[in-house]
Image (cartoon, grey):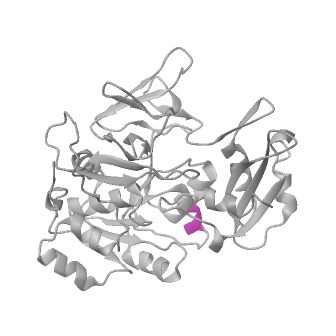
Amino acid sequence: MVVKLVNLFKWHTEAHYSSLQLKPSNFANALAKNLPIARFIKEHSKGNCPIILDSEKVETNKSGDIGTFRTKTGGTSKEPKVVLRTAQSWVNSFEVINAFHKGKENYLIFGNLTHSLALYGILEALYLGHNVHQVQQLRSKDELKALVQFKPTFVYITPTQIRFISSYFIILPNVSNVFIGGGRLNSQTREMAEKIFPYAVINLFYGSSETSFVTVSDSATPIGSVGKAFPNVNIKIEENGPYKNRIWVKSDYLFLKYAQGSNRNLIWRDDWLTISEYGTINTDGYLFLISEGSPRITIADKTLEAYEIEDRLKTVENVIDAAVWTVENKLSDYRIEAAVATKGYVYSEPLYGILKEINPVFKPKKIHKVNLNDWPLLASGKTDLRTLKSRFHDQ
C-alpha cells in the first residue's frame, strides 16, 4: 500500500521548532501552510532524515495504523540496521510521555535525525504542541550557547552526550525532566547529569530502536535498576534452560521488521520480542539488566564485560569517555586495546594504574589518547567504535 506523507504524523499548531541550521522564517512558512511534520523534517534535514515511505504491503494486525516509516539503529560497533515501524507505534508512546509534562515544554534534542532517539524526540514535541530545539553539533560553541539561551525544560539525551556537555561546565536550571537512554548510566555519569540539570527528575529508560520504551525509572528505583515496565508494556523473563534470564517484551511500541540488515539475536514468538538481552525482575517489579548492551570479551576461557574497563578509565582526571575493543593476535586469541577521550593533559600512569585490579589477561596492551574534539560520535550520540578502532588497529 502507498501511504501519503501527510498521514504519518499530525502537526500541532502550537508547536515550534528551532535549530541553528534553520532560518526561523522557514518554520513559520511551514506552519502557515500546514506542511506535514514528516515533509518539513525531510526537507530541512538535507536528505539525512530516515522518514521513508514504504510502497510494500506490510502485514500487521494492529488497527489504526497511520503509515510506516524507517529509521536506523544506533549500535557502536556494527553497521546500523534500518528499522521499519508504524507511525502509530510512536504516537502511542507520545501520549504516555505527555503525562510527564507540566505545561508547554521546551524540548532539547541532541544529534541528527538519522538516529531514532533524536527523530523520536522532535516528532513527539511537534505532535504534542511543544517547543523543540535541536543541537546538531555537540562540539560547536555557537550550538552550546544557543541551547543555554533556549532555556530547555525537557531533555532527551544519551550518557555519552552527558559526558561531553559536562566538560563545558554547562548548567541548565530550567530543566524539570531528563530522559536518558542509549547506554549504561554509571554513577559518575549520573552525578554529571545531576550537576547539569540540578532541579530535574532524572528518568533512565531502557529500550532499543526495535522495542522503543521497555522500562522507565522513578524516584523509588533502586540503584542498578532501569525501572519498572513502561505503561502498556509487558515483560517476562525466561526462567529455565540455556537462555535463562532472557528478556521478552510485548507492547504496542514494537517495530515491524528490519527493512535492511538482520540481527541473529532478535527473535519473535507470537507477539513477544527479544533482542537477547538478559535481566531479572525483583518482587517490586524493578528490572535489573545483566550486561546491558556491553560487549563481552572472552580470552583464554575467561570473560569480562567491556564496561568494567571503560568505567574505570572514565574516573581518571580529564578523561571524558573511554572505549575498549579486541584485536586479533597472532600469538594468542586476542589482545585488548583502549582509547580515552581527553580534555586537558592525561598522564599514562594513572590510566594503567586504575586497572591494576583487572585480571592481567584483560589489561589493555595500549591505551590511546584522543582529543575530545577528535572523538568520533555516531548520530545516536554513542561512540563510533568502528571509526575509533580503525585509527589504531594496524599499529
Quarter of the picture containing the C terminus is bottom right
Q: Quadrant of residue 120?
A: bottom left
Q: What percent of the width, then of the height, locates residue 150? A: 37, 76
Q: Residue at x 32, y 53 (%)?
A: 70
Whether residue 30 is situated above or below residue 311 in the rendered picture: below
75 vs 2, nearest the viewer: 2
Q: Residue at x 52, y 81 (%)?
A: 141
Q: What percent of the width, then of the height, locates residue 346? A: 79, 68
Whether residue 331 is situated above or below residue 367 in the rendered picture: above
Residue 276 within the magenta-colored segment of the rendering = no
Q: Is residue 315 visible in the rendered structure shown here? A: no
Q: Residue at x 56, y 49 (%)?
A: 185
254 horizontally vs 38: left or right: right
Q: What percent of the width, then of the height, locates residue 33? A: 11, 76
Q: Quadrant of residue 154?
A: bottom left
Q: In this picture, which residue range is highlighted in magenta?
A: 162-166
Q: What percent of the width, then of the height, locates residue 124? A: 28, 58
